[in-house]
């Protein structure tokens, strides 16, 4: 490794080095110098060991420590003077500030030093960011190696500053049984140790914290000259800037890069630092240059270099502003040259073979963006969506508190609708975890950033993952749906473990204006948790009002419609029900089938007509008899539903199948009855992708088929209706499932050979003007609706394919014949291209069976159609029905008429 000659720096020579001529304080200077050199020697071993455990990090060994003397010279300039005591303390902080960037510095495992709660929280967030879902306890107990390694690196990076503070007092046993400390001299360790530890840790703090922690100077020790006082703030600023400016190729040597072969973001860091020359200072600007041009393959490293040096520029400016505002002596380095634009940066870091253009997304007016995307533009004119999001946030807050406070007995959500002088107000209150000011600013108001997945929030609330907390929030924009209801919004919050004085009031006057954050008035009591209060912009009973989709304009019915399962009791109160109603906790995953049906399709009101309720109960019996479970890989229920939904067509109320997101209604479909659990497909959360895999859905479909057969309900009409779904799922059909109609009735795979044997020509009708009905199975004219009898050699395939959400699980064209995939690029409609389009559908399935029945090839069937330009049309006996398009297929061995 290349050495830095720290002893030649002005800082060292003017402070700790032996002075030429008479030195009245040579003994005191020598004592500090000897102590520092002993510390440097001991720490060099520790720093070298750290590199073994964290090889992807750039160089953090003793050469980095020595280089800080050089960059400290750079940032200080000639106008900043240090005395030997200050230089000693600063030098010790140089040694320790990154000494915990490896496992060796902890004396134990990283999970143990973090603590079980914080380690599991870190794993939980990393798992969520990689897999898109929150882990369960078993996955936290045995995380994938890739996630554990990444968390170990993140944990060391996040905790190394605090661990550096502890290293002053930490000891290691020697082979002789004695204890080894990094700072060997006990009086110096006891006198300066706490300050050195705090300074070492401070390089990771926000700049503003430095003034509060280090504002006052420290006096000299009794055996030192009186003027060897210590300006702690000056040293903290020098350490901070010396460390942040110390990047160049010596921290990422080419040979070491090749030997360690770092991956991911670390690799990009290494690559850009291999280009960087030693920094210089021109006036108050620190100047970096590249040793060689960046080639196109190095473009990510070039952009990282620009972002990194902009970060250094911000640090320099922040420290300079702090010292200026406090009236303290300013350092010489105050900014980085050339980082204000990519064009100027390219003058210092040249490129070759490409041109840097800054095409990153820029948001110049965040309030306007929130105004555009936070309400109707994202969610549409569906005010009930806002209620769903508010209730979900409230439930997450209560569940978070339960995870942090296991003995918390009384989690609840209260929703109230009130009217005063024609003005309506909706209030959603929870007694959950609540928010402090930092969470409000950097969590709730950070549009697009889900606070629950933020490491900062997890650090402020350690133990969420260990308590089994799995939030529903995902996109970080749900709260802003409240502006669907109205512009005047108040949010009152108090963290569960904070005092009343820490409660905060956040008021909004629309999404496009900046909110106002204030303390709550001192008088009165503010409960733990959060209350959101919004003044409605229209009456809830208006068309498209809040209660538009309820039967009796009741808030309780709206909540029951939206919240299909809940872990927290929800209490509603409204003018029509002053006493209130309660939606008790319920789990779709464990409820009995009849209970699930009642939760999904409840009686609309207490005074429902007897006949309608009797019909609903009959449908419930049918559902219980037919519904089967959709199970995940661990055998847990993630759906309970019937395939195909003839319930949808019965009665005067909706029995659509429901896709749930974290227990809330998201989407519905007439293709099934019951529920299927999903995950958000887009930020508005009105569409869900099923949690289940293809194989899990196939297993459910197969159990549905078996259930229908065992109950003797799998009749011809239902077979025709489900044939497309079965084929889409399995790319084949059972031999006895009807899928087409001929003059002789329905046709099954088992009957094709006998039927085709009677024909030398078959006309495959392709839809309009013909349609089909399943109950009873028949063909009809699409426009007139009259029943049509097909000629003996005609066939109509009954194509009814699954809609959402099954269509996303089994997408159109997924099972096309891969052997003909190249035909998609044909510029004319060849028989191969037509077959490739047909091959994944029931038409293609029939053609395969026909080839088997006639002992012919696809080419012999389809090539003549291509020659006729796919233009076959025939007429029914009733000429008024008009021409019917289709394919006239000839048995290849039969004579084809001219």
Image: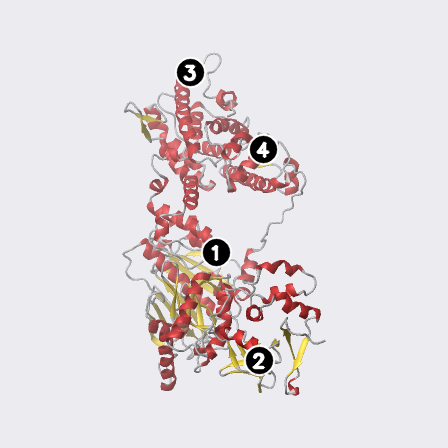
- Side of 217 relative to 323 (left or right): left
Q: Mark 3 or mark 1, which has the lower sequence index?
A: 3
**Numbered label attached to residue 771:** 2
Q: Which residue is mark 1?
A: 445
Q: Nearer the viewer, mark 3 or mark 1?
A: 1
Rendered position, 87 above or below 451: above
Q: Nearer the viewer, mark 4 or mark 1?
A: 4
Q: Nearer the viewer, mark 3 or mark 4?
A: 4
Q: Do callouts 2 and 3 mark residues in contact (Cβ within 8 Å)?
A: no
- Residues 870 and 270: in front is 870
Asked whether residue 556 is in view, the answer is: no
Secondary structure category for the residue under label 1: loop
Q: Which residue is mark 4?
A: 276
Q: Position of residue 342 (x, y in %)?
A: 63, 42
**Numbered label attached to residue 526:** none
Q: Which residue is mark 3?
A: 26
State the CA–CA distance, disc 3 to disc 4. Answer: 39 Å
Secondary structure category for the residue under label 2: strand
State the CA–CA distance, disc 2 to disc 1. Answer: 54 Å
State the CA–CA distance, disc 3 to disc 1. Answer: 58 Å
Q: Residue at x 38, y 72 (%)?
A: 707
Q: Position of residue 664 (x, y in %)?
A: 42, 66
């Amino acid at each position: 490794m290349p050495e830095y000659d720290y002893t030649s720096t002005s800082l060292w020579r003017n402070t700790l080095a032996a002075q030429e001529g008479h030195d009245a304080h040579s003994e005191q200077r020598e004592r500090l110098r000897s102590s520092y050199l002993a510390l440097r020697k001991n720490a060099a071993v520790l720093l070298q060991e750290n590199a073994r455990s964290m090889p992807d990090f750039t160089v953090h060994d003793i050469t980095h420590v020595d280089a800080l003397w050089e960059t400290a010279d750079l940032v200080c300039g000639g106008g900043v003077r240090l005395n030997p005591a200050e230089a000693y303390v600063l030098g010790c902080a140089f040694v320790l500030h990154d000494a915990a960037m490896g496992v060796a510095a902890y004396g134990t495992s990283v999970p143990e030093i973090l603590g079980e709660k914080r380690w599991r929280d870190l794993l939980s967030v990393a798992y969520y960011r990689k897999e898109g879902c929150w882990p369960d306890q078993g996955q936290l107990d045995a995380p994938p190696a890739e996630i554990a390694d990444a968390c170990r690196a993140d944990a060391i990076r996040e905790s190394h500053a605090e661990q550096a503070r502890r290293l002053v007092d930490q000891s290691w046993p020697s082979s002789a049984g004695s204890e080894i400390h990094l700072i060997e001299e006990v009086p110096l360790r006891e006198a300066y140790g706490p300050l050195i530890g705090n300074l070492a840790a401070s390089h990771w703090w926000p700049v503003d914290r430095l003034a509060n922690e280090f504002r006052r100077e420290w006096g000299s020790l009794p055996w030192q000259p009186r003027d060897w006082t210590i300006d702690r703030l000056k040293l903290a600023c020098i350490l901070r800037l010396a460390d942040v400016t110390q990047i160049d190729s010596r921290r990422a040597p080419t040979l070491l890069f090749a030997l360690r072969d770092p991956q991911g973001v670390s690799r990009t860091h290494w690559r850009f630092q291999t280009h960087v020359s030693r920094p210089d200072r021109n006036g108050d600007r620190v100047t970096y240059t590249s040793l060689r041009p960046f080639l196109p393959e190095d473009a990510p490293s070039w952009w990282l270099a620009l972002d990194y040096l902009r970060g250094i520029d911000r640090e320099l400016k922040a420290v300079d502003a702090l010292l200026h505002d406090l009236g303290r002596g300013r350092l010489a380095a105050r900014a980085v040259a050339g980082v204000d634009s990519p064009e100027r940066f390219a003058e210092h870091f040249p490129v070759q073979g490409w041109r840097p253009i800054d095409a990153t997304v820029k948001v110049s007016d965040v309030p306007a963006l929130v105004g555009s995307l936070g309400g109707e533009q994202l969610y549409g004119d569906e005010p009930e969506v806002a209620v769903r999001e508010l209730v979900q946030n409230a439930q997450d807050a209560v569940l978070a508190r339960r995870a942090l406070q296991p003995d918390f007995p009384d989690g609840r959500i209260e929703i109230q609708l009130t009217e005063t002088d024609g003005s309506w107000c909706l209030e959603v209150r929870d007694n959950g975890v609540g928010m402090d000011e930092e969470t409000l600013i950097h969590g709730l108001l950070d549009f697009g950033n889900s606070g629950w997945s933020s490491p900062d929030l997890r650090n402020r609330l350690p133990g969420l993952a260990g308590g089994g907390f799995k939030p529903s929030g995902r996109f970080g924009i749900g709260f802003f749906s409240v502006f669907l209801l109205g512009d005047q919004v108040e949010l009152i919050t108090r963290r569960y473990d904070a005092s009343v004085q820490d409660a905060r009031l956040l008021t909004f006057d629309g999404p496009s204006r900046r909110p106002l954050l204030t303390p709550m008035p001192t008088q009165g009591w503010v409960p733990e948790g959060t209350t959101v209060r919004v003044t409605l912009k229209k009456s809830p009973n208006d068309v498209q009002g809040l209660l538009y989709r309820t039967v009796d304009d009741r808030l309780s019915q709206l909540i029951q419609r939206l919240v299909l399962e809940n872990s927290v009791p929800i209490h509603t109160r409204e003018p029509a029900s002053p006493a209130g109603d309660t939606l008790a906790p319920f789990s779709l995953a464990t409820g009995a089938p009849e209970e699930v049906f009642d939760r999904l399709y409840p009686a609309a009101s207490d005074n429902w007509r007897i006949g309608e309720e009797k019909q609903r109960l009959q449908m419930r019996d049918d559902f219980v008899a037919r519904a089967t479970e959709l199970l995940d890989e661990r055998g847990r229920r993630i759906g309970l539903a019937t395939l195909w939904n003839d319930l949808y067509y019965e009665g005067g109320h909706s029995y659509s199948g429901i896709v749930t997101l974290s227990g809330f209604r998201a989407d519905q479909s007439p293709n099934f009855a019951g529920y299927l659990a999903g995950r958000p497909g887009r930020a508005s959360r009105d569409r869900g992708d099923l949690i289940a895999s293809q194989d899990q859905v196939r297993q459910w479909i197969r159990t549905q088929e078996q259930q229908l057969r065992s109950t003797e309900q799998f009749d011809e009409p239902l077979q025709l209706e489900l044939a497309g779904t079965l084929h889409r799922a399995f790319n084949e059909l059972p031999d006895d499932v009807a899928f087409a109609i001929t003059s002789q009735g329905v046709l099954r795979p088992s009957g094709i050979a006998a039927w085709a044997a009677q024909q030398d020509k078959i006309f495959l009708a392709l839809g309009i003007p013909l349609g089909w009905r399943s109950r009873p199975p028949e063909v009809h004219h699409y426009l007139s609706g009259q029943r049509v009898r097909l000629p003996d050699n005609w066939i109509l395939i009954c194509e009814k394919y699954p809609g959402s959400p099954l269509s996303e699980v089994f997408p159109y064209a997924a099972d096309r014949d891969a052997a003909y995939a190249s035909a998609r690029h044909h510029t004319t409609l060849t028989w191969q291209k037509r077959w490739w389009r047909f091959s994944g559908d029931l038409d293609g399935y029939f053609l395969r069976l026909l080839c088997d029945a006639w002992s012919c090839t696809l080419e012999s069937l389809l090539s003549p159609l291509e020659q006729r330009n796919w233009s076959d049309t025939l007429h029914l006996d009733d000429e008024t029905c008009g021409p019917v398009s289709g394919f006239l297929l000839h048995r290849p061995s039969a004579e084809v008429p001219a």
